[in-house]
Image (cartoon, rainbow, N blue to C red):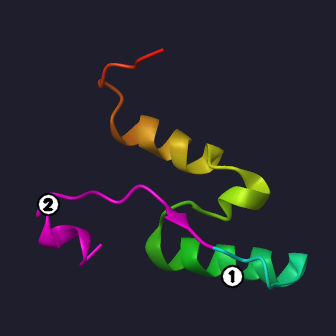
Amino acid sequence: MAIGKLTNSAIRCVGISLNTSKLSKTERQQVLNQYSAQTGLPCVDPLIEGTGAIVDQLLREFPNETRRA
């Protein structure tokens, strides 16, 4: 988030995306849970489980935004 604040001081992070391709399924889940617990944000490997948890958080954070089809 510190890097994002260089271009937008009002940045709001809604999730974390990690590449866990070199981890076992058990290790992957432990790492995702660890980062999620540390930050309070959904943490996913988008290539394995998709981005649904981050999209859900985005919709909770910005419920009044106009949705485009």
Count the marks: how many? Answer: 2
On screen, residue 30 above or below 64: below
Counting from the top left corner in percent of width and height, residue 4 is at: 24, 68
Counting from the top left corner in percent of width and height, residue 44 is at: 64, 63
Q: Residue furthest top?
A: 69
The Cα atoms of the two marked residues, 1 and 2, are separated by 28 Å
Q: Give the overall secondary structure of the magenta segment.
A: loop
Q: Are marks 1 and 2 in contact (CB under 8 Å)?
A: no
Q: Which label lies toward us, 1 or 2? A: 2
On screen, residue 54 above or below 13: above
27 or 4, which lies in front?
4
Name the residue: 54% across, 40% down.
Answer: 56
Horizontally, residue 47 falls left or right of residue 16, namely right
On screen, residue 54 above or below 20: above
Q: Earlier in the sequence, mark 1 or mark 2?
A: 2
Q: Amino acid at mark 2?
A: Asn
Name the residue: 45% across, 73% down.
Answer: 39
Label annotation for residue 31:
1
Q: Residue 11 in magenta?
A: yes
Q: Which residues are magenta?
A: 1-18
Q: Amino acid at mark 1?
A: Val
Counting from the top left corner in percent of width and height, residue 61 is at: 36, 42
Q: Which residue is the site of mark 2?
A: 8
Name the residue: 25% across, 76% down.
Answer: 3
